[in-house]
Image (cartoon, rainbow, N blue to C red):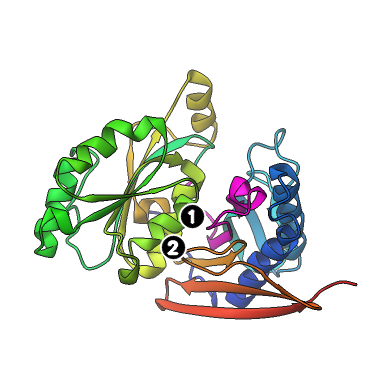
Amino acid sequence: MPDIPEFHDRMLSLGLARVSEAAALASARLIGRGSEKAADQAAVDAMRTQLNQLEIQGVVVIGEGERDEAPMLYIGEGVGTGSGPAVDIALDPLEGTTLTAKDMPNALAVIAMGPRGTMLHAPDTYMEKLAIGPGLPEGIVSMDMSPSDRVAAIAEAKGCSTEDITVCVLERPRHEDMIANIRTTGAAVRLITDGDVAAVIHCAEPDTGIDMYMGAGGAPEGVLAAAALKCMGGQILGQLRFRNDAEKERARKAGIEDLDRVYSRDEMVQGDVIFAATGVTDGSMLPGIKREPGWLTAETILMRSKTGSMRRMTYRHPMES
């Protein structure tokens, strides 16, 4: 692990919360309007504008895609005023564009920040993810284990039956065999349509009833989820999955040499990190944007790995006339 500079994050944390709030508020007017691209673009524009007000030398390492494909906040883009600490930024201005367009639960604006050179530059490919909550032995589950063996291992560690375990999985055809294998143990499977950052976070929240997350989703979202678990505790493993040679080449350009490597949480996010998320639509982690005459209200969760602190903040913003 490289030498990591001390991350003086206390003064930056509130600014990061403002960034996710701005993205969520901007996309709120497009909830249920049926346009994924318009909602995403509104969130991107607002997040970039707010980021450029922060006293940082920021580089987007997890962003909206490659430079030629993304209108703003592309991977490698510099943000901030150009003064202050050098930082890596991982972001998803609108995690759940489809959820927003259809007014479905669990759309979020998400961002994380850490010292320069400490976050995995994950390409825009799939990542196989496996996450569990805090308080369990390191290495209790692995990518080499079958889904049913993972369930058995976590049940033994928790001193309960496999029938008491709940696994969260993204509902996709590629996961049908995995879901069937999990259910052979008697465990419950909670299926989600989108939004696997929130789903991974739920592994670290006892009141959600989720014990484990597994399955393939976006690699950028895997790094964002790792940042959240760095603050909350819990374990996550990630392994990139490639559909073609072009995706492998994209990974090599991002500096990844071992294409089969399994990354732990602390390999995806090597230093201290701040994580902020603001609800866009009502969800299991955060309420969505609320409208009342003359006002918009947003709720944000803000976490710091250095202190293990977690804040929930409500922001009431006057609507433009």
Total marks placed: 2
Q: Is residue 112 magenta?
A: yes
Q: Which residue is mark 1?
A: 224
* Residue 190 position in % (x across, y down): 34, 51
Left or right position of 306 against 314: left
Check disc 1 and report its element: helix, strand or loop: helix
Left or right position of 197 against 319: left
Q: Is residue 147 visible?
A: no
Q: Is residue 316 above or below residue 21?
A: below
Residue at position x 19%, y 63% in the image = 136
* Residue 279 position in % (x across, y down): 58, 65
Amino acid type, residue under disc 1 in the picture: Leu
Residue 228: mark in rendering:
2
Q: Circles 1 and 2: CB distance less than 8 Å?
A: yes
From the viewer's side, name the closer residue of 41 and 224.
Answer: 41
From this viewpoint, which residue is outermost toward the right? 321
* Residue 2 position in % (x across, y down): 41, 54
Bounds of the magenta segment? 94-121
Res 103 → quadrant: bottom right
- Mark 1, other Cα within 10 Å: few <14 / some 14–19 / many ≥20: many
Q: Is residue 132 magenta?
A: no
Check disc 2 and report its element: helix, strand or loop: helix
Residue at position x 10%, y 57% in the image = 161
Q: Is residue 132 above or below residue 308?
A: above
Amino acid type, residue under disc 2 in the picture: Ala
Res 203 → quadrant: bottom left
